[in-house]
Image (cartoon, grey):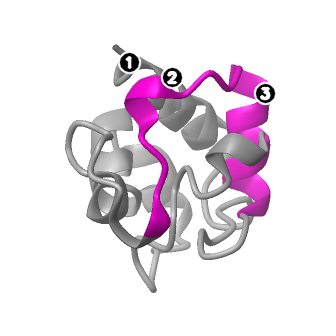
Amino acid sequence: MNRLVLIFCAVLSFISTSAQTKTSLTAKQLYEKNCQRCHGADGAKGSMGAKNLQVSVLKAPEIVSLLQQGKKAMPAYGKKLSAEALNELTAYVKTLRK
């Protein structure tokens, strides 16, 4: 897990907390809104210390935990995204792997 400490680095300083926003976005839209700034569209950008998601070896529960709790520059999304949205975002992130 330490290897990908900043898997979703500080991408936006704001995230809508409304229930509608939490569930209405597709997984790709969640990624674009919350992750793409640092990780890039293909997951390999590496801005601000973001890890390359194309080479990630984290398992789904580890990714969800990292998303929920955040780490270093990456914000915590546990209170901002629903469990369903976190799972969808995790599944999308795994599609970026090579």
User: Residue 70: horizontal and vertical position, in percent?
Assistant: 71, 63
User: Residue 94: horizontal and vertical position, in percent?
Assistant: 47, 21
- What residue is pinned by disc 2? 91
Q: For the residue labelled by badge 2, is the local secondary structure a helix, a strand or a loop?
A: helix
Q: Give the range drawn in magenta.
A: 49-70
Which residue is painted at 46% across and 74% down in the image?
Answer: 16
User: Residue 30: horizontal and vertical position, in percent?
Assistant: 38, 49
Which residue is painted at 73% across and 65% down in the image?
Answer: 71
- What residue is pinned by disc 1? 95
For marks 2 and 3 on the same chain, the one whose residue lies earlier in the sequence: 3
- What residue is pinned by disc 3? 61
Q: Is the residue marked by circle 2 packed among few (<14), some (14-19), or many (20+) residues within 10 Å?
A: some
User: How far apart are the two marked residues, 2 and 1, measured between alpha carbons?
Assistant: 7 Å
Q: Is the residue marked by circle 3 packed among few (<14), some (14-19), or many (20+) residues within 10 Å?
A: few
The amino acid at mark 2 is Ala
User: Residue 90: horizontal and vertical position, in percent?
Assistant: 56, 31
The amino acid at mark 1 is Thr
Looking at the image, the residue that sits furthest to the left is 41
What is the magenta segment's predominant secondary structure? helix
